[in-house]
Structure formats: structure tokens, C-alpha cells
């Protein structure tokens, strides 16, 4: 049984309340850990510590190289805990081990180190301003600098589907900018987050620079609306994202929102199905479909429709659903009974609206414990249907035929979301031209893997969010621009 306390001002401390969050293994429904359920007063303590560390502490006034050195110590201590984080990810998230090692833990560690080694030491925090001629009261000559300074206290709120990845993708730019942090994990997956408190201790991070609190809806609202918080970075559903935006509005905080998606994967008539079909299957089953940027809406030219559906069904036969601790498993469980209920409700909505299930649609045989569903493929889908417009956050894909490229673009953009997309074509230049017309923040051509680069901005259009994450683009979200101008005489 794993147990943690809250981490506030460099100390492990109990909550002011008596409630406890129980963490389940979603594959077995067994209790694997407990942490305090933070209260509004716990949030107050955490924000006060972060505020003090920013206003009085050395962190925001350190040089970029000094902050980089501290972050590299953090990275070293983090990498020493790789095996622990991978194991926790399998246990509390339900990731298969390959995904835990590569995507959930390995990738964000590389991003964090890259932020310290490259972005932070190369970023122009201070740039000279070109001489300015003319002034308010007549002729004048002035010069100066433009400084980039930390925004202040950052509230980082992560989601359950990728706790280590999301925590580190948010923490790296916040720390690099000189902000101090209050980090709030999702209630279902807090254990990996608290490892970061142990890492902060090992790295000698100054007290108050990183604080970790849990909490319910009231605690979350207290954090996102707190006048002592200067910037909020939230990952989650678009519904909750809108609430966070409204909670932050009265104090005019900077808000970064990484929300949902219903991303289109366009397969043109000359596409190579040998490459495209595995991509369709991965986008349905990776992390059991619990990924905001997964391409779950396949738009295929009508000449390839039957062939593609047949090949996808054959490929889905090879997906082994089960306990992610088993090395042979290729798809694990959903995070909770509630999430499984939501996915099953949307599957039923698809049936009710006239779509046909070409594969799956139920619960896997023989798995009586754990929050499992079958990978499910819908056909006879109109783009206006619920299953084509709403995010499942589960292993469900829809296939929709199109007649020509204009219709493909129209269907791809006919969504309230705009996080990611894909284009498959024999000519990558032609695919690029199509990509420029898709209203999404990230477009993959022929399965391109740029999404794993620490220098690729990640963010969405429309209801998929505000702002971006990763690299220098993500760093700038935590910085303010200040002009300092002086007379040349």
C-alpha cells in the first residue's frame, strides 16, 4: 500500500481535513494507495508558500543558468526514479508497460531535460531595443531593453490519463521561467505526482518552489480563482476548462487550457493502407483511447472505405485486452467505472442514432474485474452524429467516407474541436497543402512523429484550448514582457 502526505513549502504535511482519496488499480479494482484529500485551507497554505517563495525567495531572481543547474539536478533525481514512475503508471493509470516506459515517463523526462539544457540557457530573456527617434514632447532619442520576466505563482492542474507526462510538460516551462508552482493532480492518479515532491527534496529545490496538493471541486476552484495565483495551466475536458476559465477571469489571470479533441485522420485515395491502417488502430487503442489528440475520426475516400474497414477489423483481432502488468497485453482498462459508463453510454448513443458497429461494442469476455471495454469501430456514421462530434476518451473509432478533397476538408473542420489531425497521401507536398487548410494545432502527414519533439508546440484551435505547451513556445506562456526605456542623453 502506497501512502503520501501533501507537499507544501518543502515539507510533507497532513491535510487540514479528514477525508482520504483512495487510489484503485483500474485493471483489478484493488486499492493500491491513499493520499489526503486536500481542502480549501490546504490550497491556501500551498499558495501562500508559493507566493512567499516567489516574492521573497531566490528562485525568480536566479540567472537562467542557475535555474538550469537546479533543474538538471531535478532531472537527474527524476531519472533515478524512472522504474518507480513506470510501475506506478502501470498500476494507477492502467498503461501497458511499453506506453508507460516510452510515452508516459521516458518522453516527458527528455522534454524536462531539454528545457534545462537547451531552451532555458538559449532563450533571450533580455533583448536590446532598437533606438527610437521622436518623443511625446518633441524630438528625442531613446534606447532600452525588452525583458521577459516570470508571471509569478503558477497553478498547474493535470489530468488522469498521463500524470507524469502532463506534470513535467507543465512544470518544466514554469520552473524555467522562474515561476513558483502549486501542482494539483487528478484525484484518480495522484501517486506519480507525489514522487515529484521526493525528487524536489533530492534535488534541493528551494522550499515553496514546488507544492503539491490534492482536492475536490471546492479545492480546485479555490486554486484557480485564488488572487495569489498569476497563471493557471489546466489539462482536462472542455467542460471543466470553461469553468476554469470563468473562475480565473475575475482576477485576470493568464490561462493555458489543453482540452479535448475529436481529431480527423484523412486518408486520400492514393494513400498506403499498409501504413495507414496500423495508425488508425493505434489511435483507437493507445492508452485505451484516453488521449486528447488521438485521431479517432477516420475520413477515408469512398473508393477505399470497404478495404480500410476490413483491414482495421483484422488488425483489431490482434489487440489483446487485459491487465497491463502482463507483458503480452496491448490494451489495458479505462481509468474508472464512471469513465467506462460514459463510453458505454456514447456507444449506445451511436446505436440509437443509426450507426452500425463493425467491431466490438461490449465488454471483453473473461475480464470480470477491472474497467475494460472492447475496442469498438463504428460505420454508417454521419458527421453530425453524437459519436462523430463528442469525445469518447475511450477505445472507439468512427469511419466516414468522403467523395472528394473538398468534402474531406469540410468534414475535418466540422467540429467544435481543433487539436490534431492527420493526412495520408502518396505525395507529401499535396498532403502539406491540405494540412494548411485544417483548423487544428497539430497535423501529422503520413504518420509523422513530430509530436514527440520537445520543440513542437502543442495546443489546439476552437474548443480544444488556449495557448500551447512544449519548448520555447511553452516557456513563453509563463513569461511577461517588460520594456525598459531610457534617454540617450
Image (cartoon, grey):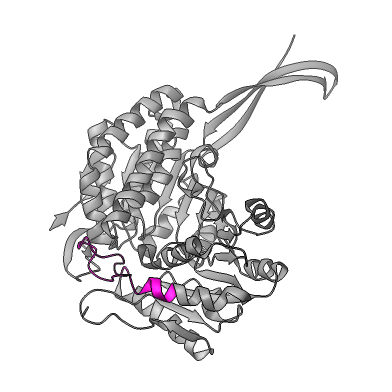
Q: Residue furthest top?
A: 489
Q: Residue at x 26, y 56 (%)?
A: 97
**Residue 465 horizontal/vertical position (percent):** 55, 57
Residue 418 belongs to magenta span: no
Q: Is residue 328 magenta?
A: yes
Q: Quadrant location of the C terminus?
A: top right
Left or right: residue 251 compared with residue 86: right
Residue range highlighted in magenta: 312-335
Measuring from the top left, give residue 400's x and y in whole percent.
Answer: 58, 76
Is residue 238 among what the camera can see?
yes
Exactly how many numbered labels are in the figure? 0
Please name whichever residue, 239 or 301, is drawn nearer the observer in this view of the structure. 301
Whether 74 is drawn above or below 464: the answer is: above
The residue positioned 69% from the left and 58% from the top of the image is 437
* Residue 158 image-quadrant placement: bottom left
Q: State the residue at coordinates (29%, 61%).
A: 93
Q: Nearer the viewer, residue 102 or 384?
A: 102
Q: Is 348 placed left or right of 269 in the picture?
A: left
| Residue 22 picture location, percent across and down | 21, 65
Where is 201 relative to 218, above or below? above
Q: From the viewer's side, name the closer residue of 140 and 385.
A: 385
Amino acid at each position: 500500500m502506497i501512502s503520501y502526505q501533501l507537499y507544501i513549502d518543502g515539507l510533507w504535511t497532513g491535510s487540514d481535513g479528514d477525508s482520504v482519496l483512495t487510489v484503485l488499480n483500474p485493471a483489478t479494482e484493488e486499492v493500491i494507495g491513499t493520499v489526503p484529500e486536500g481542502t480549501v485551507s490546504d490550497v491556501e497554505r500551498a499558495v501562500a508558500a508559493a507566493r512567499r517563495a516567489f516574492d521573497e525567495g531566490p528562485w525568480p531572481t536566479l540567472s537562467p543558468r542557475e535555474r538550469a543547474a537546479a533543474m538538471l539536478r531535478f532531472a537527474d533525481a527524476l531519472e533515478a526514479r524512472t522504474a518507480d514512475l513506470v510501475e506506478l503508471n502501470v498500476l494507477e493509470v492502467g498503461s501497458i508497460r511499453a506506453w508507460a516506459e516510452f510515452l508516459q515517463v521516458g518522453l516527458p523526462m527528455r522534454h524536462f531535460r531539454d528545457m534545462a539544457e537547451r531552451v532555458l540557457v538559449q532563450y533571450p530573456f533580455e533583448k536590446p531595443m532598437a533606438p527610437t527617434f521622436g518623443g511625446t514632447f518633441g524630438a528625442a532619442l531613446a534606447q532600452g531593453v525588452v525583458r521577459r520576466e516570470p508571471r509569478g505563482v503558477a497553478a498547474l492542474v493535470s489530468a488522469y490519463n498521463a500524470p507524469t507526462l502532463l506534470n513535467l510538460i507543465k512544470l518544466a516551462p514554469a520552473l524555467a521561467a522562474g515561476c513558483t508552482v502549486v501542482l494539483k493532480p487528478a484525484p484518480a492518479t495522484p501517486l506519480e505526482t507525489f514522487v515529484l515532491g521526493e525528487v524536489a527534496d533530492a534535488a534541493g529545490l528551494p522550499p515553496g518552489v514546488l507544492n503539491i496538493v490534492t482536492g475536490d471541486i471546492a479545492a480546485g476552484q479555490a486554486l484557480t480563482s485564488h488572487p495569489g495565483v498569476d497563471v493557471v495551466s489546466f489539462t482536462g475536458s472542455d467542460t471543466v476548462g470553461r469553468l476554469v476559465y470563468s473562475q480565473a477571469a475575475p482576477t485576470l489571470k493568464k490561462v493555458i487550457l489543453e482540452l479535448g479533441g475529436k481529431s480527423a485522420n484523412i486518408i486520400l485515395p492514393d494513400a498506403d493502407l499498409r501504413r495507414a491502417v496500423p495508425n488508425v488502430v493505434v489511435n483507437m487503442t493507445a492508452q485505451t483511447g484516453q488521449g486528447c489528440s488521438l485521431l479517432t475520426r477516420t475520413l477515408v475516400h469512398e473508393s477505399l472505405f470497404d478495404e480500410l474497414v476490413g483491414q482495421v477489423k483484422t488488425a483489431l483481432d490482434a489487440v489483446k485486452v487485459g491487465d497491463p502488468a502482463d507483458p503480452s497485453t496491448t490494451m489495458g482498462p479505462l481509468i474508472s467505472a464512471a469513465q467506462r459508463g460514459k463510453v458505454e453510454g456514447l456507444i449506445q448513443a451511436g446505436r440509437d442514432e443509426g450507426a452500425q458497429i463493425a467491431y466490438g461494442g461490449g465488454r471483453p469476455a473473461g475480464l470480470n474485474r477491472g474497467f475494460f471495454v472492447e475496442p469498438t469501430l463504428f460505420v454508417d456514421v454521419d458527421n453530425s452524429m453524437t459519436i462523430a462530434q463528442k469525445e469518447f476518451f475511450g477505445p472507439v473509432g468512427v469511419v466516414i467516407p468522403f467523395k472528394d478533397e473538398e468534402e474531406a476538408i469540410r468534414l475535418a473542420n466540422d467540429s467544435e474541436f481543433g487539436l490534431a489531425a492527420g493526412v495520408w497521401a502518396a505525395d507529401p507536398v499535396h498532403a502539406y497543402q491540405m494540412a494548411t487548410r485544417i483548423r487544428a494545432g497539430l497535423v501529422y502527414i503520413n504518420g509523422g512523429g513530430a509530436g514527440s519533439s520537445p520543440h513542437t508546440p502543442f495546443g489546439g484551435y476552437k474548443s480544444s484550448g488556449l495557448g500551447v505547451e512544449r519548448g520555447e513556445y511553452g516557456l513563453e506562456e509563463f513569461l511577461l514582457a517588460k520594456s525598459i526605456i531610457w534617454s540617450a542623453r
